[in-house]
Image (cartoon, rainbow, N blue to C red):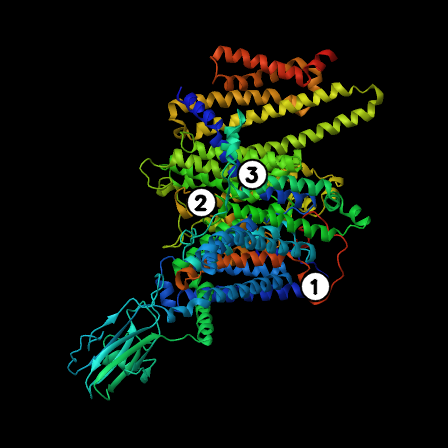
Amino acid sequence: MGVLAMFDNVIEGIFSAAFLFAILRVTTPILLPSLGALISEKAGVLNIGLEGMMLSSAFTGVVVSAYAQDWFGPETGVTVGPWLGLLLGVCVSLLLSFVLALFHLDLNGDLFLSGIALNIFGSSATVAIMFELTGDRGNTSTLASLQMPFVRLPEFISQIPIIGPGFYEVFDNQSVMTWLAFIGVFVVSFFLYRMPIGMHLRAVGENPEAAASVGINVKRIRYMALLISGFFAGLGGIHMGMGYLQLFQRDMTNGRGFIALVTPSLGGGTPAGTMVASLVFGFFDALGIRIGSLEIPSQLPQSIPYFATVLALVIYALQRRISQRVTEMRTASGAAFDAAFWSSIQRVSILHMLLMMIAVIGVVTGVSMLSAPNGFGGAETAVPIGLLIGVASIALFVAGLPFVRDIFSIQRHWQASALVTVLSLGIYLTLLLALFFEPPLALALGLALSAVVWLMIGGRVLMRGH
Amino acid sequence: MTVKSKQAPAEPGQGLTFLRKHLLLIIGAAAGIIATFFITNTMFDGSFEKMTGTPTWQNILLVNLLVGTCILLFVVELKRQAIRVLLTVIVALLLGFLVTFIFNLDSADRFGSGEFRVQVVSEAEPSENGEVDLEYNKRRGGHFNKPNVVAPVSEIAWTFAGAEGDVVSLLAYAKNRRSEVDVLVELRDASGATLASATSATQLQVDETFDDLVSVRDAVIADYSLPAAGVYTLYARPEDIETSTVLSEALSQSQLAFEALLLGPIERVNRWGVWIQDAITLILLGMSFAIVFRAQQFSLGAEGQLYFGALVSGIIALNFSNVPGILLIPFIILASATAGFVYGLIPGALKAYLNANELVSTLMLNVIATRFFEMVLNFQLKPADAGYVASEKFGPNAILPVIVENTQVTIAVFVLAVVVVISWLLIRRTPLGYEIRIIGSNLRFADYGGVNSKRTIMLVMAIGGIVAGLAGMHLANGIHRQLILNISFALAFEGVVVALLARLNVLVVPFTGLLYAYLRAGAQFMERDANVSFEVVRMIQAIIILLITAEALVSFFQARQKRADIDESGHSLDSLEDDDV
């Protein structure tokens, strides 16, 4: 029962305004470099060096804002300092991305390795200079560095009925960098899809030869893309050092520059999708912070987004293969092709994959509970529950496997597919509903709901098809 | 050990090639022998008795011979490319020296700031005057110009009263030996005119005349006889630092730092041990990357595989500590290799059968492995009363046997030698190795040629995992002898450098690993001896990667080459591989 109470506690925390506030805050340093990664990826020059650029900019920002108070006097320094830090930090980040572009585009260096070199450089140069300036190699707590201003919302918003108070609590007093990040999504969107140069950029990424043949200067576009990605990485770094904390810690980006490389592909290569993917990472980050105070090892929720990314890669690949298969069939069978039938089969197969993804996370949870039972309230409770979760998840995973490997088996054994889908989705929904209702009622509701979902997604067509 | 077999396939009939190979062999052997001799000589200060007096000196000699062998292999394998690698390292070191120099530009500041005191020494009777600050033979001051205070006092004027003919000596000196401030002192009369001044003291004054003086940087106006009775002023401040002093100080400090960097690791046996043990880890990681990159797979999974290898070998070491070592150690080695294999198989299978980007998946799997390691360590292996997150120390049976006393140089040296030979055989002498090389040079061609590229890609990543798992075992059971957080210490990326410097040649990786570990070990001693941050060496590392990867750099400086039309967007390591497939 202790585990259920814990679960309850977590869910309650998740639905609070403070938690949403935290999500936005921790999403910012993922979203900003993700936008940079998106643009560089669209131009076909994925910027691996984001991490190093973020670190350099964070460090520059912190140091400049601290020294600005000496340069301009304490009064002007406090207002000017953060913005000067932002400016110079972004400049340093731009400089590094220029070096990357120079080495890759002009000196034929390998993009991947040059990026890694910049990461090492960013990580080491910041620590070396910090050691010179402060004599400390851990953080800059001895420097009186400043913070980016916070945006206060007008008071009347909280007076709006129903949504007002919650909205106010979530969005009021967020750092200006958070606002910049989410505004950046629209700007990037506009840039990529509404401006000629954005079109050129995408053309270069998709087919450089074709782009060059219509007179686009490929190299210049790629320079620009790398510089823009450096710009966003710089902003992300500024948020790390001056957005919430007021200091620089060695390697404080802690892999965010690498997460940012993944979010665009996870988000389907669109700015909005990238934002959603970043929010997913932010959600789990915030969850990890929150769970830290509970009796669950924070490492487990923290590693879930990484699992999700690997699984998303797998699903993406499988999905592409299935679409190819369906397209082939379409060309082969011509007018006799039943488009509605096959697209519902595709949808059902995606549902299978998503359910298997949850099953994998279940397996991971089970394995974690078995390998570190002391972290989950001792061996007596953790081992049986872990075994149960693990075995059930493996069973559900194995049950779904044939339908993901071969979509024709969905067609052939649609009853079995339906059973597996409804059962596994039902179990997950039941777990969630058990928080609000009695277990038997939750089970009934869960199964009913999942049956409805299956019908809506394509079950109707499948049943009619036979 | 692998030297002879390397030389076997010399093509007969091509006299010139034959001669050149021999020439290379001679150059390589000479370089190897010189290096072996130099290292051993420096370690024991050139004294044969000191060497034979050291316990297990035979093993030290053996390891040094292996180091020499690595140099031989480097020369023989890379041929002319070896010069480029060496040049790159030298250029990067020079740039590193420049950085160190810039960081050390403030080292002359210690002459301009620091606590100092003043004193008027005289044997005459003190004059009675209540309005002056100084009496004869009383020390004053101590907080002048102290760094890190809010308002440092950079100059000071004290007054004292004296009678006509009083013989006085005016002293301004550093408060203690830690303060290296370089002061000057002046004697002024009541109108403010300077009567005498001094900027230094003689060695004799420091040693004998005045007890309080610390060094010749202190200032003394000796035996001045006051012209008239009245109030005088003692004025003292740190001397202005000249630019030449600033530069020469920075230079000598940087030289000191680089001496520690370049010679530190072979000064003493225990320092040498730090170098060798670090090199073993780096070489294993470099091998892992070299094998995987050879097949054009950009897998960065070595870090995660290392963590898994370390975790598995650590758990075995903790649970089976009463099994005799002769059984336990091989078991641990096998288990860690298996762990690495399995964890390498995952991204391999994802890449081979689902075409999932290996760079992304391995980066994600690295984080997952690290978190999992942390979780198990934190909640399961950590003793309840431990102050920090670490497992218990391993029992003596589970620790790799040490072959050089007072160091952590273990039988991992031999494990490593075996790994190098096997990897070489695998890449150069087996069908699988052939497939790996074919896939690396042209995947499509490999597919047409009937290579089962999926299986090979999966296997090559898993094989890389084996070596990385062994690296984890070496860290856990050889060096730390317990499981700790951050056991890899971000070594994985350094393995990338090692593999690249070796141009993905598994026979050259041992040399580049040794070279790189040497720099890392040197950096530790540089930080300890010369107060220059360890990170300077990582900056040097970044510069090395940039220079090595920029293929066009050479021609860029030679002439303005024709602009490349459209460069390939994909990653290309082709140019980094040696051509003899």
Location of residue A316 (image quadrant): top right
Q: Is residue A361 above or below residue B247?
A: above
Please name the residue shown 71% across and 65% down the image: B15
Location of residue B485 (image quadrant): top left
The span from disc 3 to disc 2 (Cα, nearest Å) is 18 Å
Amino acid type assigned to the residue bearing label 3 in the image: Met
Q: Judging from the image, what secondary structure is the residue with disc 1 in?
A: helix
Front position in the image: A376 or B211: B211
- Left or right side of A126 for B439: right
Q: Is residue A466 at all visible to an observer of this figure? A: no
**Residue B480 place in picture, x, y as percent:** 40, 46
Q: Find residue B555 and name its label.
A: 1
Q: Are marks 2 and 1 on the same chain?
A: yes
Q: Earlier in the sequence, mark 2 or mark 1?
A: 2
**Residue B150 place in picture, x, y as percent:** 35, 61
The span from disc 2 to disc 1 (Cα, nearest Å) is 42 Å
**Residue B572 place in picture, x, y as percent:** 68, 50
Q: Find residue B308 and name its label.
A: none
- Mark nearest the camera among 3 and 2 is 3
Q: Are marks 1 and 3 on the same chain?
A: yes
Q: Residues within 10 Å of mark 1 (few under 14, many from 20)?
A: few
Q: Residues within 10 Å of mark 3 (few under 14, many from 20)?
A: many
Look at the image and tell me in which quarter the N terminus of chain B lies: bottom right
Residue contact at pointers 2 and 1, CB within 8 angstroms: no
To which residue does mark 2 refer?
Answer: B487
Q: Judging from the image, what secondary structure is the residue with disc 2 in?
A: loop
To which residue does mark 3 refer?
Answer: B364
Q: Is residue B571 above or below residue A275?
A: below
Q: Judging from the image, what secondary structure is the residue with disc 3 in?
A: helix
Q: Are marks 3 and 2 on the same chain?
A: yes
Amino acid type assigned to the residue bearing label 1 in the image: Ser
